[in-house]
Image: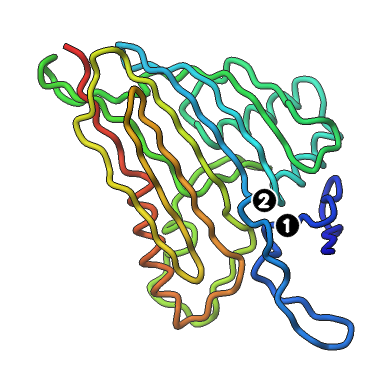
Amino acid sequence: MWIDADVLGPPLPAGRISPELRDRQALATDGSITPLPSAGSDTERDEIDMRLVVDTKGDAKGQLTMLLRGRTAQELAEALVHIVGAERQRALRAVVLSWVPFANIDDVQLSSSEGSWQIALRAELSIGSYAQIEGTSTRNQTWVLPGVEPIHSVFPRAFTTTLGAAYAGQGARENALAIAHAVQYHVRRRVELPVGASIARMPGPFDTKTPKLEASRKIAVRATCRGGFHPRCSTEPSPTDRYGLFVTAAHKTDDAFLSSLRIKPAL
């Protein structure tokens, strides 16, 4: 049984593995080097569920539910022991804004128990002009629904960026690429459109798998637009001869995740 106890905040339950330790090598007391367990990788990722309703003006209201695991959740759980009141509310709002930086946070609540090894949040959102309008005349107008940035830093400073900006800014490397923080999450986004609106253009499905980076995006359109985003960026050091493969996959992932959805509003 693997026990990952050397973490900030509450210890992980037996059998749980920090995302930052997956794909790493362990040095045993007898001198042998073996890979750390990788079981349960899909159950350790962050889960983000976003449900929005767009009105006829392009404004949106909805809910965001977050279940955070890994080092980010451990650091946040440690901080929540010491901050209360207005400071805690500001910290929780910053966590939500790391995923929807353009939103107004109407309400946010910590739904996980105190001292939990994972952090669960629920937030009520309102987003003005969520659907960006293109075109001058009413008949030729098109709404543009944004994609999702691939990397989200939640704590201690909230910001979003792309894989290319974070890890692929160099044309070549002289040493191996090492990523300290694992990027592993699954986003479910459901956008309910107003009556009469239709899909004008949507991105196709995307799926890439490399030794360093795995990512996929899927979109389904019924009465609502449903999108799933699932990246996995390993912390295993990448040799210099594989850096070009990682850069290519990173740029493709950025393009796929940021691709927008175009809607024809009701006349």
Q: Residues within 10 Å of mark 2 (few under 14, many from 20)?
A: some
Q: Is residue 245 left or right of residue 139?
A: right
Reading the image, the residue beneath label 1 is 18
- Identify the element where label 2 is drawn: loop
Residue appearing at x 47%, y 60% in the figure: 214
Residue sticking out furthest to the right: 29
Kindly indicate the quadrant of the structure image that contains residue 155. top right
In the image, residue 145 lies at what x, y percent? 32, 30
**In the image, what residue occupies the spot 83% across and 88% down?**
31
N-terminal of the pair, mark 1 or mark 2, is 1
Q: Work out whether 139 lies above or below 1.
A: above
Name the residue rendered at 82%, 51% in the picture.
Answer: 12
Which label sits on residue 44? 2
Contact, CB < 8 Å: mark 1 with mark 2?
yes
Residue at left offset 49%, top offset 58%: 166
Judge depth for marks 1 and 2 and give the one in front: 2
Q: How is the image coloured?
A: rainbow
Seen from the viewer's position, the closer of residues 193 and 88 is: 193
Q: Is residue 34 above or below residue 8?
A: below
